[in-house]
Image (cartoon, rainbow, N blue to C red):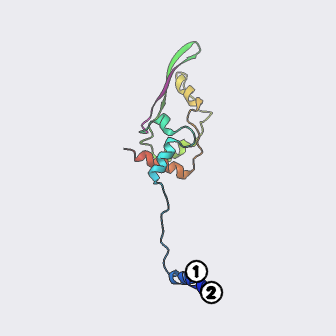
Amino acid sequence: MSRRFIYLFLVLPFLLFANEPMVKVDNTFITKYEYGKMLYTNPRGIGCNTCHGNDAKGKKIVSFTHTYRKKQYECDLVAPSIKEADYKVFSKKINSKRNPSKKFPKEQVCEKLIYYANVMPTYFLVEEEIAAIYYYVKNLK
């Protein structure tokens, strides 16, 4: 009885379907767009939308007054639009570090201050995550 049971329920189905081609099944439960949105709004800490906006078109983050050599400068920290960015540039900028030897003309006090403040967080995203965020940003309505 036990041999028949093993044969009928374990071996026979395997023999009957052994020559059937494998069907590729997509087991994902989240779309690339949804994954990109999730990463855009909360990649690892502060979301991209906090600075670049929900529409990815950028926005002013803060205005401030900076005093340098007894002169006051009115500065604006503005996150750029990433909506129209090329993928190569987009991918490079996400995980890049600032160039410590970059030079600024003397009159660009605000630009220099903001550049060296390095306000863009480093997320250490892998290429798949960057691609998902890029896909989401490009497909925003």
Residue lying farthest to the left in this orientation: 141
In the rendered image, the quadrant that contains the C terminus is: top left
Asked if 61 appears above or below 126 in the picture, the reply is above
Left or right of 1 in this view: 47: left
State the residue at coordinates (59%, 29%).
Answer: 117
- Residue that appears at 49% across and 79% down: 20
Q: Is residue 62 magenta?
A: yes
Whether residue 135 is visible, yes or no, is yes
Label 1: few (<14), some or many (≥20) within 10 Å?
A: few
Q: Nearer the viewer, residue 65 or 101?
A: 65
**Picture coordinates of residue 74 (x, y %)?**
49, 19
Mark 2 residue type? Arg
On screen, 133 above or below 108?
A: below
Q: Nearest the camera: 28 or 70?
A: 28
Residue 68, percent from left and from top = 58, 17
Question: What's under tag 1, amino acid-wise?
Answer: Leu
Magenta span dominant secondary structure: strand
Tell me the residue that label 2 is attached to.
3
Q: Which residues are magenta?
A: 56-64
Mark-to-mark CA distance, 2 and 1? 10 Å
Task: Identify the residue under disc 1.
Answer: 10
Look at the image and tell me in which quarter the N terminus lies.
Answer: bottom right
Q: Is residue 113 above or below residue 122?
A: above
**Which badge, 2 or 1, comes first in the chain's sequence?**
2
Answer whether residue 82 is magenta in the image.
no
Tally of numbered tags: 2
**Which residue is drawn at the image coordinates 51% and 83% (left, top)?**
16
Number of other residues with Cα within 10 Å of mark 2, as a class: few under 14, some 14 to 19, many 20 or more: few
Where disc 1 sits, the SS reads helix
Q: Is residue 76 visible?
A: no
Secondary structure of residue under mark 2: helix
